[in-house]
Image: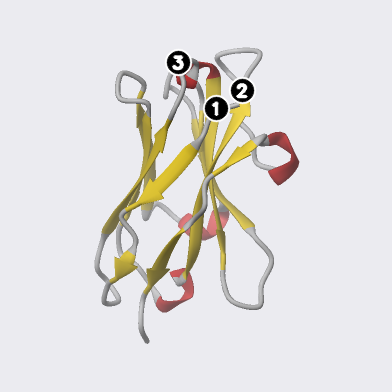
C-alpha cells in the first residue's frame, strides 16, 4: 500500500479556484490509479474523478461538468485536483485514494476499488 497526504484545501469564494495535492509515499505510485472523492456534512462520500497510472485516462462525476481537472506527476509521486468555478455545493472534505492497477487503462469510480486513503483536506465555499 501507499500512504497518502492531501494538502491545498481552504476557504475560497464562489467562482474561485483551488488546487489540491496528494503526495504518496512508496516507490510504486506509478502502478496505482488515483481517485478523488469528497464528503459533505451529513452526506455520503462520493466519487469526484479518477486518473489512470500514466495519466492518459481521466474520468469525472457528472457534477464536475468541466470545472475540475485531475493530473499526476509520477516523478513527484503526486496527484492533483484543480478545481475552478467553485460553488457552495463543492464544500466538503476531499480525499485522495489509490487503487492497484492491473493495466494502464484501469480507472476506478467506486470506493471499494481503492485500498489506500488520505486523511482528507477541507474545502469551504461560503454561500
Considering the numbered disc 3 on the image, is that residue within a helix, a strand or a loop? loop
Q: Nearer the viewer, mark 1 or mark 3?
A: 3
Question: What residue appears at the point 36 percent right and 21 percent down from the top-left corner?
Answer: 74
- The residue identified by callout 2 is 106
Give whichever of discs 1 and 2 has the lower sequence position.
Answer: 1
Q: Nearer the viewer, mark 3 or mark 2?
A: 3
User: Which mark identifies residue 27?
Assistant: 3
**Would you say the residues marked 1 and 2 are in contact, meaning their CB atoms lie under 8 Å apart?**
yes
The answer to whether residue 14 of the structure is visible from this angle is yes
**Would you say the residues marked 1 and 3 are in contact, meaning their CB atoms lie under 8 Å apart?**
no
Give whichever of discs 1 and 3 has the lower sequence position.
Answer: 3
Label 1 – label 2 distance at C-alpha: 7 Å
Question: What residue appears at the point 55 percent right and 14 percent down from the top-left corner?
Answer: 104
The answer to whether residue 60 of the structure is visible from this angle is no
Label 1 – label 3 distance at C-alpha: 14 Å
Considering the numbered disc 1 on the image, is that residue within a helix, a strand or a loop? strand
Vertical placement of residue 89 versus 55, above or below:
below
- Quarter that holds the C terminus: bottom left
Q: Which colour style is shown?
A: secondary structure
* Residue 79 position within the rendered picture, expressed as x and y whole percent measured from the top left: 39, 35
Quick one: which residue is furthest to the right in this view?
A: 112
Is residue 50 left or right of 77 when viewed as pictured? right
Vertical placement of residue 90 versus 77, above or below:
below
Give whichever of discs 3 and 2 has the lower sequence position.
Answer: 3
Q: Nearer the viewer, mark 1 or mark 2?
A: 1
User: Which mark identifies residue 68?
Assistant: none
- The residue identified by callout 1 is 33
Considering the numbered disc 2 on the image, is that residue within a helix, a strand or a loop? loop
For label 3, the crowd category at 10 Å Cα-Cα, with few meaning under 14, some 14 to 19 and many 20 or more, is few
The front one of 45 and 25 is 25
Label 3 – label 2 distance at C-alpha: 19 Å
Question: What residue appears at the point 66 percent right and 78 percent down from the top-left corner?
Answer: 42
Amino acid at each position: 500500500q501507499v500512504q497518502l497526504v492531501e494538502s491545498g484545501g481552504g476557504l475560497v469564494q464562489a467562482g474561485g479556484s483551488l488546487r489540491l495535492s496528494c503526495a504518496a509515499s512508496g516507490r510504486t505510485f506509478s502502478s496505482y490509479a488515483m481517485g478523488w472523492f469528497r464528503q459533505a456534512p451529513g452526506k455520503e462520500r462520493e466519487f469526484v474523478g479518477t486518473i489512470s497510472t500514466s495519466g492518459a485516462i481521466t474520468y469525472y462525476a457528472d457534477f464536475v461538468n468541466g470545472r475540475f481537472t485531475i493530473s499526476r506527476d509520477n516523478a513527484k509521486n503526486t496527484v492533483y485536483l484543480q478545481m475552478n468555478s467553485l460553488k457552495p455545493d463543492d464544500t466538503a472534505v476531499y480525499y485522495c485514494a489509490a487503487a492497484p492497477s492491473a493495466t494502464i487503462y484501469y480507472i476506478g469510480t467506486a470506493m471499494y476499488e481503492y485500498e489506500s486513503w488520505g486523511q482528507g483536506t477541507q474545502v469551504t465555499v461560503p454561500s
